[in-house]
Amino acid sequence: MNTIFIVLPILTLLMFDLGLALKPADFKLIAERPKPVLIGLVGQIILLPLIAWGIILSPFTSHLSPLFIIGIMLVACSPGGSSSNVFSMLAKGDIALSVTLTACSSIITLFTLPLIMVWVTKSVQFSDVSIQLPIGKLLVQNIVLMVVPISIGFIVNFFKPLVAEKIHNVLKRIAMPALVLLVTVFFVQHKQTIVEEFGSLGLTMSILILATTSCGALMAWLFRLTTKERRTLVIEIGMQNAAQAITIACSPLIFNNEIIAIPAIIYALMMNLILLAYVGITKICHK
């Protein structure tokens, strides 16, 4: 089974669901409270790829194959995941800020992801590995799979808010089982590679998540953001759109290489475990 036929509808539904949650007021948040929005975007768009590249350059990860390095950076360059909105709600965070950051990062990374990944693919050209990134096809694919469904969801919510709310309530329950299905299928197809590399890749992705969430918390503290804003930044900066990274890795138009998607699969697993633990801690602290 080609994984792309599973991940494509999942990503499309997630982006459509994000559009359903968007309201015009969410964009006003940029003007009304620019500080948390700007800090969140700096963390996602700039700091996250830098931290990922720093981890890759460390002696600890020197044995990783070029394909895994590309996969790690692909995750780091991806926008915030739509599941972060649910996690922000569970952590008693700022949901409006979470939705705004996810939407803004989805748009901005249309341009930043290709630029960074072109540099990454050129930087890891060694041994017998040669990977090319067709920027034009990547941009078109992201517009079709992300901008279009987000726009449709936003339009539905604008004209039919009650209908949008009903659909959103259904889709947000489907999102997690769909991702579990994707991870399961991927594990079955690449069981040996995942088992062999889980020790190093699992630890690498865990370090990445912990480092980025810690940066989010530190920036929120330095700029004296509210508790709700801090919790949201921790989740937004730590939770990337693994489905998009998997789509780009597996797409016949882009990398067409499922090995590149393995770091994103492991990231999705560790991301949910770590951030669920964080939500649990916030609930204890809230009491």
Image: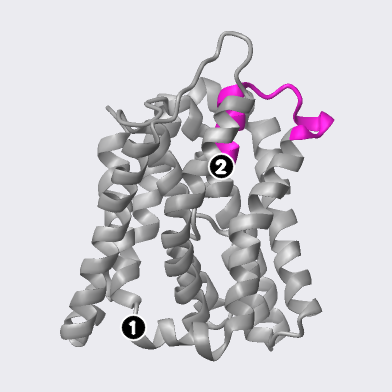
| Quarter of the figure with residue 211 | bottom right
Residue 14 as seen in the image, left or right of residue 43: left
Q: CA distance from mark 2 to mark 1?
A: 30 Å
Q: Position of residue 41 (x, y in %)?
A: 58, 66
| Quadrant placement of the C terminus | bottom right
Badge 1 element:
loop
Mark 2 and mark 1 lie on one chain; the one further toward the N terminus is 1
Q: Position of residue 244 (x, y in %)?
A: 41, 47
Residue lying at the far right in this picture: please name it. 59
At a point 42% along the width and 34% down the height, the residue shown is: 249
Residue 59 is one of the magenta-drawn residues: yes
| Quadrant placement of the N terminus | top left
For this rendering, which residue is in front, 142 or 18? Answer: 142
Q: Main secondary structure of the magenta part?
A: helix
Residue 119 is one of the magenta-drawn residues: no
Residue type pointed to by label 1:
Lys
| Total residue callouts | 2
Task: Please provide the residue range marked out in magenta.
Answer: 57-73
For this rendering, which residue is in front, 191 or 38? Answer: 38
At a point 61% along the width and 70% down the height, the residue shown is: 40
Residue 22 as seen in the image, left or right of residue 92: left
For label 1, the residue is 23
| Quarter of the figure with residue 247 | top left
Q: Report crowding for label 2: few under 14, some 14 to 19, many 20 or more residues within 10 A (C-alpha).
A: some
For this rendering, which residue is in front, 20 or 222? Answer: 222
Up the image or down, 187 lies above or below 41; here it is: above
Is residue 201 in view? yes
For label 2, the residue is 116
